[in-house]
Image (cartoon, grey):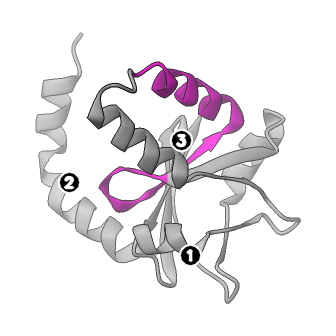
Amino acid sequence: MFYGEYEHTLDKKDRIIIPAKFREIFKENYVERFYVTRGLDRCLFVFTEETWKNQEKKFREMPFTRPEARRFNRLYFSGAVDVVCDKQGRILIPSYLKSYATINEHVVVIGVSDRIEIWAKEKWKEFYDENQGSFEDLAEKLITE
């Protein structure tokens, strides 16, 4: 559903513009509310409400008696915030999420199928530079006919 890579800048009020292509997808699918939370690799995950509810159900089913499940759920859900785009297509990034993702001013917003990821520009470049050479190896290991 979400594809591509877009560079943006936080404004003075810590808002970023969601790429127009993504906003079109929201509109086509009647998505008004979505969720932002701590992602893996120090980025932020953005989910539609429907995808978020599916994730929540799956994580809720993890046994709370397992310490790993408790720690993960605490970090994942305590970081979550529901957001709605303003008329200019912007969302507010709370300071604790900015801090987690080491976002200052420049960000890269990428589409990763059913989610959007928001990266500090430097972190995205670092991740991309470190991993682009292993793309074919990853494909061979993960994709089966």
**Residue occupied by mark 1:** 95
- In the picture, residue 139 is in which quadrant? top left
For badge 3, the amino acid type reads: Arg
Asked if residue 122 is positioned above or below residue 101 in the image, the reply reads below
Number of marks drawn: 3
For badge 1, the amino acid type reads: Ser
On screen, residue 92 versus residue 126, left or right, reads: right
Q: CA distance from mark 1 to mark 3?
A: 21 Å
Secondary structure found at label 2: helix
Which range of residues does the magenta coloring cover?
A: 38-62
Question: Picture coordinates of residue 41 (x, y %)?
Answer: 30, 55
On screen, residue 60 versus residue 133, left or right, reads: right
Quick one: label 3 or label 2, which is nearer the N terminus?
Answer: 3
For badge 2, the amino acid type reads: Gln
Q: Which mark is residue 130?
A: none
**Residue occupied by mark 2:** 132
Quick one: label 1 or label 2, which is nearer the N terminus?
Answer: 1
